[in-house]
Image: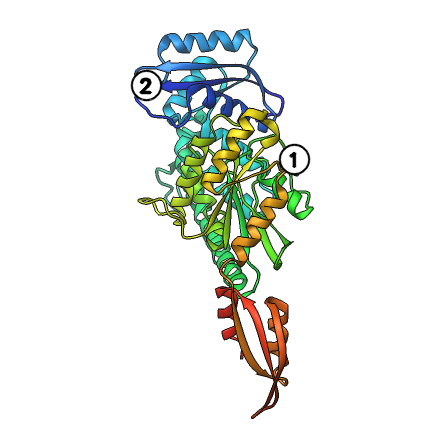
Amino acid sequence: MTRGARALVLCPDIKALRYDLDARERLAEAEGLALAIGIVVSHSAILPIRKMQPNTLFGSGQVENIAIWCEQYEAELVIVDGALTPIQQRNLEDRLKRKVIDRTGLILEIFGERAATAEGRLQVELAHLDYQQSRLVRSWTHLERQRGGFGFLGGPGETQIEADRRMIRQRMGRLRRELEQVRKTRTLHRERRGRAPWPVIALVGYTNAGKSTLFNRLTGAEVMAEDLLFATLDPTMRAIRLAGVEKAILSDTVGFISDLPTQLVAAFRATLEEVTGADVICHVRDMANSSHAAQKKQVMEVLADLGVVDKENGESSIPILEVWNKCDLLDAEALEELRESAEGQGAVILSAVTGEGMADFEARIAGMLTGTAREVSFILPLSDGRRLAWLHAHGDVLAEEDAGDGEAGPQRRITVRLNPKELGQFATLS
């Protein structure tokens, strides 16, 4: 797909289906996806569909109109914001004489361009092959030619399409094995972080909610943060300091989106599973977006798929703080209404761009991380320098005094505030 290509963006509004977003919002999101990869949207339209046509999805009259728009707006590409079967895609390309891609294909193009790490590229390639293997039906005539057989006597051979499918299956098998190794490595890293004293804060949210901008403001990093869908793909982690928390790890994750292709959900599961090891999840929401409620629903569904949120009662196994972002884009009346709602729902309001509300946000996070801490006292021999140093490094030392002599010599009584995770880690020290 060429950057700068002119495209027609079509949003099929199928009456038989139920959507979380209305047609106008879905069309705007599709345009945003196209812009995110440098495509010029020459024209866009919502096409109501009473009955889906198995061969083209759209009715014959609508296909004729689309062909006219392609000529009128000089579109080289047609983007359909929905799922097309391989047959529908091939037939539309035959009739329109243009390249046609559906929502899944478009998101795969974006992910393929944005993936920066070796793991990200593996995940994208696996998702792309999974998507592509069913679409060889729309490939060119050379795929129907037979290749020679093997062995001394020759044989019927195999068609090129069969060979391509076999190669795709083999490549997918290799990628899955490599990603399984990545998953194991990530699990080991999470376990290692679990033994470390530092709490993990994960930023999640709908794409373009402002997670990366918030991440940059908290850490001083320069993670890509633009007004684009899927500006960030690969997870990024940085250490931050909060009141009462010497060190915490902040994790920025891939943004969610409505109707995320199943191939991508499966491929990026290893990345998304970083969320399951967090001590606190910050759900960043774009409150200036009229669809913020529907976007929240999509995020909670993904968290439920990961096992973080119970699908029946909606309760989370990990504390979730709602971060209502982009308050700088609201007028005074809307902002006042938002503040009243935030008080009742325990949310924090801020602007990651201007910094408004950041102090309150950091205080809330620090409180959530230290809220479960309790005071405990230990009597340790002075010769046990390792555990004494550990308590000073990882706990909030409240008091320290001589405790007389013990079997191992002089002792110290140390009173310290620790959370349950730190207490467990201290208990394992020998």
Q: In the visual, does 250 lie left or right of 80? A: right
Q: Identify the secondary structure beneath mark 1.
A: loop
Horizontal and vertical percent position of residue 372: 49, 60
Q: Is residue 145 visible?
A: no
Q: Identify the secondary structure beneath mark 2.
A: loop
Q: In the visual, does 45 lie left or right of 226? A: left
Q: Is residue 2 visible?
A: yes
Q: Is residue 307 above or below residue 378?
A: above
52 or 172: which is nearer to us? 52
Pointer 1: what residue? 353
Give, as a three-letter code, the residue at label 1: Val
Pointer 2: what residue? 15
Residue neighbourhood size for the residue with mark 1, other residues' Cα within 10 Å, grouped as few (<14), some (14–19), many (≥20): some
Horizontal and vertical percent position of residue 31: 53, 22
Q: Residue at x 42, y 40 (%)?
A: 300
In the picture, residue 113 is in which quadrant?
A: top right
Q: Residue at x 58, y 36 (%)?
A: 210
Q: Which mark is residue 237?
A: none
93 or 407: which is nearer to us? 407
How is the structure coloured here?
A: rainbow
Point out the tag, 1 or 2, that comes first from the N-terminus. Answer: 2
Q: Is residue 72 above or below residue 188?
A: above
Q: Residue at x 45, y 49 (%)?
A: 176
Q: In the visual, does 222 lie left or right of 144? A: right
Horizontal and vertical percent position of residue 313: 32, 45
* For discs 1 and 2, the disc positioned in front in the rendered view: 1
Horizontal and vertical percent position of residue 244: 61, 59
Measure the alpha-carbon separation of dots 1 and 2: 40 Å
Give, as a three-letter code, the residue at label 2: Lys
77 or 274: which is nearer to us? 274
